[in-house]
Image (cartoon, coloured by chain):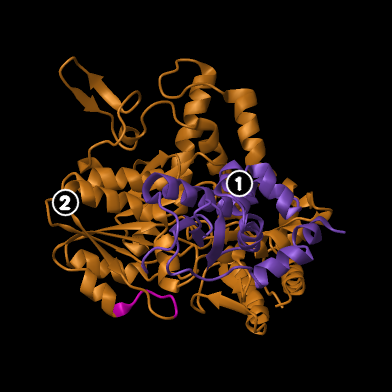
Amino acid sequence: MEEIDQMYQENILDHYKNPRNFGKIMNATVHHHEKNPLCGDELDVYFLIDDGRNIADVKIYGHGCAISQSSASMLTEKVKGKSIDEIKKLKKEDILEMLGIPVSAARLKCALLSMVLFKNAITIFEKYIKEPGVKRER
Amino acid sequence: MIKTKLNIEQIRKDFPILTRKIHGKPLIYFDSAATSQKPKQVIDAMDNYYKNSNANIHRSIHQIGEEATKLYEEAHEKVADFINADSYQNIVFTKNTTESLNLLAYSLTSKLKKGDEIAISQMEHHSNFVPWQQLAKQRGLKLKFIKIDGEGNLDKKSIQENITKRTKIVSLTHASNVLGTINPIKDIAKIAHEHGAMVVVDGAQSVPHMPVDVQQLDADFLAFSGHKMLGPTGIGVLYGKKELLEEMQPFLYGGEMIREVKFDDTTFNELPWKFEAGTMNIAEAVGLGAAIDYLKKTGMENIRNHDAELVDYAMAKLKKIDWIKTYGPKERGAVISFNVKGVHAHDVAQILDSDGVAVRAGHHCCMPLMGVLGVPATARASFYLYNTEKEVDHFVEALYKVKKIFGV
């Protein structure tokens, strides 16, 4: 297989074209936005966090390249139902393993956008929001 | 068919990098708007300088110092001749277009009063955008934007509206690095001068690709980079009308740019050295001189025609593909910005690279323009004298690979 086909393998393209958990949660516990101005990629995440500090629901919303969007889609599946501590523990290597494709240095930022977004959202939750559960519609 | 007068096969032999294989495929370099490749004549000239004549310039009372000085000063003369400036005294060497424009932004705005206006356009590169924006903020000036029309040309009405008696500086790109638009600088300069404004031209994309004559344009200042015109990185040019350069305060202070230093004051050197502080990029100046020799020998008219034919050839092919959208006017420089439907420009560039085709993807340092176009990014193919129709054919084939992978 050519390297380029390894990069754009079926599951990556599938997640890009049919992103999982795509949309918004209007009464999410925490909502956060990140962008990568150099690429023009933008991504929002909405977490509904339950009393046990687990991710009861997650949605992502945005646009960008196949790598950033598929990475975000896969990450929602990875964290849904898990404790927020799992998100705090995420490392670059976890994302690369999850993607399972060769990612060049120039595309690393794309691959990691969703991880940075998710982690920052959790930081905001712990620092400012603190209380789990549904919030009033924003 | 390309009717160009250029002997492309011969030209390609002068560019060592064009023999490279990328992922096992011949390199197709369609990123000359970012930086051009360098012919061996330029590489050799710099090599020779370092091997035979390397010394510091202007105050060396020894043979190689005199040789280096002569080469460095000759490079100024070559540039002056190339753009039809009056003399080498109109030619200041800088690091690149960006530095030339920063020099102007700092030096010219220092004499403006609060509320004075500067007009630029929506299509400016960040280099001709951010310096004016920041200096306007610092000095209480007003920055105005000339709009672009639906095709990607400067809007005529917006030109009239934004150049008024309050306007002190009009700074515009000669050729857009995204849309390829070639702006009617001569006409705009006339309007600006009628209103008493100075005209700054960003020639980064025009000077390498077409005959540019500062007298004919009646530009007060022209900025461009060596590395986009077959020369090395690290050498740029600021052309200015002599009386304006004379009046301007230096931007960088230090060695070489001074005449006499006393404890309480300093008098500055004559033009152009007054703006060239510290030991300059001498080898790069020599390289730029060699690049200009190469361009002159090839003929700028011929290069312009070759670019135009290649762009027409590529546009005719791209227009037939309904999953590709191109941006910019029909009359354009050697630049085609485009998007593949449903595919991010970075993915397009990545897949093209796997076929050896180097294009650029992103905002091309024109974030405000991307906003006007309503896209986060575009892919951009840009051509130069060493590119061929056959390469365009490969490029289009590679686009079909994008279509296949993404199932567009």
Please determine whether, in this image, residue B331 is positioned above or below residue B165: below
Left or right: A16, with B84 as reference point: right
**Residue B155 counted in the magenta span:** yes
Residue at the spot of label 2: B140
**Amino acid at the residue labelled 2:** Gly
Q: Position of residue B294 (x, y in %)?
A: 61, 50
Disc 1 marks which amino acid?
Glu
State the residue in front, B53 or A101.
A101
User: Is any atom of residue A98 visible in this view?
Assistant: yes
Which callout, 2 or 1, points to the residue nearer the camera? 1
Q: Are marks 2 and 1 on the same chain?
A: no
Estimate the spatial distance between the alpha carbons at disc 2 and disc 1, rounded to whole Å. Answer: 50 Å
Identify residue for label 1.
Answer: A86
Q: Which chain is purple?
A: A
Q: Residue at x 60, y 66 (%)?
A: B344
Q: Which residues are magenta?
A: B151-156
The quarter of the picture where residue B270 lies is top left
Quarter occupied by residue B236: top left
